[in-house]
Amino acid sequence: MSLVLHVDAGPWRAHQDLVVSGHQGIVPVAKGNGYGFGLGRLAAEATRMGLDLMAVGTAEEVPALRAAVAGQPGFQGDVVVLTPWRPDDPVADQMLHDPQVITTLSRVADVAAVARAHPGARVILEVLTSMSRYGMRPDEFAEAVAAAGPLEIVGWTIHLPMIGEHLGEATDLATAALAAHRAPLWVSHLSAGDLDRFRRTFDVPVRPRIGTELWLGAHDALHYRASVQDVHDVAPSERVGYWQRRAGRRHHRLAIVSGGTANGVAMQAPTAAANARQIAQTVANGVMEAGRMALSPYSAGGHKLFFAEPPHMQASLLWVPGSVRIGDELEVTMRATTATPDRIIVE
């Protein structure tokens, strides 16, 4: 009883190779659930492509990147930890002893603390962008460099928003950073054209951090499928499931299918609702859910199926048409960054 991710290896890897060849100095990002593939599998793919550097989200993820998976050795190159170091994080502190780990620092006080306790550690300094997340302001750059002292500054990292025009912002921040200390520039979320213009503006190496485009760009190569475990005929108004909801007049067949909240089924972040269409979809979904008519991510015959009730830990109850039989496989639309399939088959 499994929710399985089927990967068409040929086009998936061809896409990876194309992205890597088109981005000089690429820093492949592998964090969290490994974009649905797992950190170990992405580490193996980076090794296959001959890459010598990867980025993870947290210090806790470094061992998973280096661990052997399915007989394949773990990643042997350098690893940059994207979440900035904090003095109350013992795992991140331990990573400062590893010469192959690059630690992100985003506050002047933290730069000074690491310099005192871990001279010689490799670090990257993060600048504050319009994301308003982590980073130092331009008026802090010189102070941070002075505080770094015995540290090896590997570069400056500029983490930009995903939407909007930010080449000007990136250029201004990079100019101020290089005035304080010359080092490579690590950037994220610049378009291909803007990245090319950014690269031509400066005479230091530019390293684009790329995750989603690299691992998830070959959409047609990835398919989540779930098996139908059982099917029951039900009468109108018959109560079903944990929550004993009544079957509607149009609901006559109840299917139990593999996949639930443990796999990330129907788990999603709040929508950004960036345009009118997305706002309308959000409102429509809310109205349906209020009426206990929530669409599921499962499909049969090209049509989305309704949940009979919220998904369980490892199974979901769906209202299905008469064509669905025990043993059938249903397509499942999954958000890769929250998906945890039971198995991954690379074919």
Image: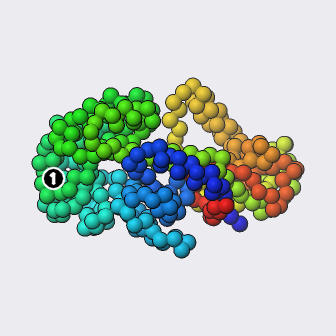
The residue that appears at 28% across and 36% down in the rendered structure is: 202
Instruction: Find numbered disc 1 in the image and state the secondary structure of the residue it sits on.
Output: helix
Amino acid marked by disc 1: Ala
Residue 315 visible, this orientation = no
| Left or right: 304 in relation to 123 | right
Q: Does residue 160 appear in this view? A: yes
> Callout 1: 10 Å neighbours few (<14), some, many (20+)?
many
Q: Nearer the viewer, residue 82 or 195?
A: 195
Residue 80 in picture, x, y percent from top left: 34, 56
Number of marks present in the image shown? 1
Rendered residue at 15%/47% (across/down): 145
Q: Looking at the image, which is closer to me, 261 or 13?
A: 13
Residue 263 occupies which quadrant of the picture?
A: bottom right
**Residue 189: image location, x then y, percent:** 42, 39
Where is the C terminus found, in terms of image quarters?
bottom right
Q: Position of residue 275 (x, y in %)?
A: 54, 27
Classify residue 167 by image quadrant.
top left
- Give the quadrant of residue 248: top right
The quadrant the N terminus occupies is bottom right
- Residue corresponding to mark 1: 148
Q: Residue 91: image x %, image y %?
A: 31, 65
Q: Is residue 108 left or right of residue 8?
A: left
Q: Residue furthest top?
A: 276
